[in-house]
Amino acid sequence: MSSLGDSKPVVSTLAVVGLGLIGSSILRAVRNSGLAARTIGTDHSHDVRARAVELDLADDICPPSFDALVEADLIVLAVPLGAMRTAISEFAAHLKPGAIITDVGSSKLSVMEDMSTVLPDTVHFVPGHPIAGTEQSGPDAGFAELFDGRWCILTPDTHTNPDALETVASLWRAMGSETEEMDAAHHDLVLATTSHLPHLIAYSIVGTAADLEQVTQSEVIKFSAGGFRDFTRLASSDPVMWRDVCLKNKDAILEMLARFSEDLSALQKFVRTSDGHALFELFTRTRAVRQRIIDAGQDIPDADFGRGAATSTTSIPDDSDQHGETGGA
Ligand code: NAP
């Protein structure tokens, strides 16, 4: 059951930079619940802006510009990780004093480093990451309930203004999310484990299957229900976003890949030595993990592998994922 509805405005003027899956979902949720008196949507793509106008995503839709951002009290950066710095740098000197800048990037240390080099002391930066998303991109992929019932992780440091932090947390709570504060380095390691590693494994498996010469391509597609198709959902996620995640969260991802390689080698040995006891023990332990995720309300037990129902009352996240939330990145 959605917790969204009419609410008091959290901010006067809210601007979203980047009108793809996450940015358009934020604008839909904000407008549906009246969380901002005025909304502005900006994107550097003409086609995306044209579609955003058709979808009526914001009061004003315009190219990124001084005029678009100077009046904003709260600016949400919803662009790929590799574009965070350039998306704000040329306007940074002209932002309203006291304005709050936040982001939704899937790695936090890199964005905090970027912002520390471009934002003036007159504005407040609050790093954030909604653990909600899908394998889809673009303004049509967004929906107002994406964040409902999901977590949003905020990674303030000693420089973060407490009032700005509370404003950003209030916005996420008003969009249906629960918020949790975390050290940025810890965030990057946690997400490397729960999101980035699973995506890399999926990219790898689907790439391997696509390259196999013993099995014809048509058999890979025809018999995909044996497990392969579940990986293809993750492996269809946006190449730009996931390239940037790998480049920007490199250290944590390499650490988790090394750990995964060790565990895969152990599993290989169990199979080679016909160690049924070890295999059964591992598979029993992993099944329990799945049950705990369902018990925590982070997925549903139904065999809805297509995750088709965008109107489902139980949305699940990718960098967490339903609609195939890849849990979002
Ligand atoms: P998306 O659907 O591809 O949307 C991003 C939009 O930003 C695109 O329209 C892109 O245009 C535009 N853009 C790129 N550079 C820009 C710039 N300098 N100025 C203005 N607009 C610019 O991406 P998304 O899935 O919403 O992801 C956005 C952010 O959310 C990423 O940082 C990602 O790590 C994070 N996130 C994603 C998920 C998920 O599941 N997808 C979950 C949680 C967090 P072009 O395509 O024309 O370049």
Image (cartoon, rainbow, N blue to C red):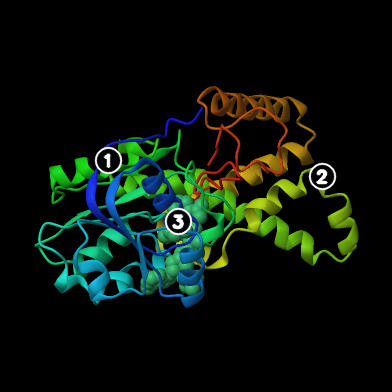
Question: Are the residues tagged 2 and 3 within 8 Å (C-beta)?
Answer: no
Residue at 55% in and 44% down: 321
Res 49 → quadrant: bottom left
Q: Which mark identifies residue 305?
A: none
Q: Which comes before the other along the chain, label 2 or label 1?
A: 1
Q: Position of residue 119 (x, y in %)?
A: 18, 66
Amino acid type indicated by mark 1: Ala
Residue at 82% in and 44% down: 225
Mark 3 close to ligand 1, CB under 8 Å: yes
The span from disc 2 to disc 1 (Cα, nearest Å) is 40 Å
Q: Nearer the viewer, residue 32 or 148?
A: 32
Q: Position of residue 30 (x, y in %)?
A: 36, 47
Specify the quarter for ligand 1.
Answer: bottom left
**What residue is pinned by disc 3?**
24
Amino acid type indicated by mark 3: Ser
**What residue is pinned by disc 1?**
169
Visible in this render: residue 215?
no
The span from disc 2 to disc 3 (Cα, nearest Å) is 32 Å
Q: Which comes before the other along the chain, label 2 or label 3?
A: 3
